[in-house]
């Protein structure tokens, strides 16, 4: 099936209120433009070098998402244009994003990445660490970032019961953090969970953003 056919099938499965972020890592500009011609404008990358190169060569109205682990020394390259950073996992990183956003006279939307998987390889904060970060004076003084939600990755497994459990846990963390820290903040509304293999479970459990690559572009 073509990319555009995959796109139509996938969009039909998604509720209107769920945003599809097309994960375009290792994809050519031609493949990305095929999706763009279908109307897709939200694209995600996990490597800064590839992200900046694509930003420079593809249409200006694409909104780019950084979904991979972000090294603090690379923030300056994406700060001028990035639409959203999904993978904030430390106060140190947030400080650098704030600093670089200020240099570019921008407010950068960020998601706190929570570790929900039963794997050591995934990055992320615990619920307690996220709360601790939000209580820091350093965070409260930041004027050039906006924390608008949470992101998490489930364990890579065929066990759908486990995936449901992990996503449910992330949604519960989102609800508690919303109530405790963002009750009057309408911007804190995004929950990024679900990838090609588990985005439908993510949607069932309350995801507002799904990050899908293979199900759109096909296997590499």
Image (spheres, rainbow, N blue to C red):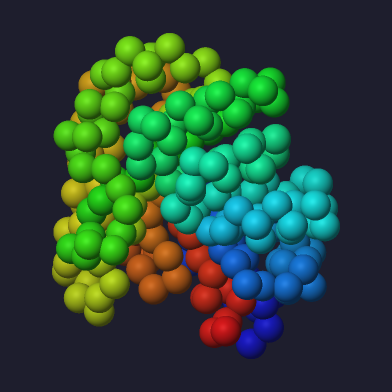
Along the horizontal axis of the image, is 165 left or right of 181?
A: left
Left or right of residue 22, residue 69 in this image: left
**Depth check, front residue: 192 or 8:** 192
Q: Is residue 170 left or right of residue 24?
A: left
Furthest residue toward bottom? 1
In the rendered image, the vertical position of residue 89 relative to residue 101, given as above or below? below
Q: Is residue 107 visible?
A: no
Which quadrant does the C terminus fall into? bottom right
Give the residue drawn at x 49%, y 59%: 211
How many badges with numbers are in the image? 0
Pick the front one: 112 or 199: 112
Residue 5, compared with residue 191, is above or below; it is below
Q: Which residue is painted at 19% across and 49% down in the image?
A: 169
Q: Image quarter for residue 153?
A: bottom left
Q: Residue at x 25, y 66 (%)?
A: 155
- Horizontal and vertical percent position of residue 184: 37, 15
In this view, the residue in front, 170 or 206, is 170
Query: Which quadrant, please, contains the N terminus?
Result: bottom right
Q: Pinpoint residue 67: horizontal percent, then vertical percent.
A: 49, 53
Residue 8's image quarter? Answer: bottom right
Residue 185 vs 40, above or below: the answer is above
Residue occupying image coordinates x 70% and y 35%: 80
The percent position of residue 181, horizontal first and vertical second, equals 29, 20
Whether residue 148 is situated above or below residue 169 in the rendered picture: above
Q: Which image quarter: residue 57?
A: bottom right
Q: Nearer the viewer, residue 17 or 113?
A: 113
Residue 197 percent across, percent down from the top left: 39, 73
Q: Is residue 97 visible?
A: yes
């Amino acid at each position: 099936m073509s990319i555009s056919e995959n796109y139509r099938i996938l969009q039909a499965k998604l509720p209107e209120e769920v945003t599809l972020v097309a994960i375009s890592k290792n994809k050519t500009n031609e493949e990305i433009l095929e999706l763009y011609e279908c109307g897709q404008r939200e694209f995600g990358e996990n490597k800064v070098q590839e992200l900046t190169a694509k930003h420079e060569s593809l249409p200006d109205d694409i909104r780019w998402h950084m979904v991979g682990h972000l090294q603090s020394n690379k923030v300056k390259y994406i700060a001028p244009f990035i639409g959203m950073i999904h993978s904030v996992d430390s106060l140190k990183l947030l400080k650098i994003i704030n600093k670089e956003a200020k240099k570019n006279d921008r407010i950068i939307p960020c998601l706190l990445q929570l570790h929900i998987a039963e794997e050591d390889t995934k990055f992320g904060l615990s619920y307690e660490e996220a709360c601790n970060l939000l209580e820091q004076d350093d965070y409260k003084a930041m004027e050039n970032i906006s924390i608008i939600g949470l992101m998490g990755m489930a364990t890579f497994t065929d066990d759908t019961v486990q995936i449901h459990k992990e996503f449910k846990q992330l949604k519960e963390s989102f609800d508690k953090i919303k109530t405790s820290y963002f009750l009057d903040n309408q911007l804190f509304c995004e929950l990024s969970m679900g990838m090609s293999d588990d985005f439908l479970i993510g949607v069932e459990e309350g995801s507002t953003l799904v990050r899908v690559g293979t199900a759109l572009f096909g296997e590499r």
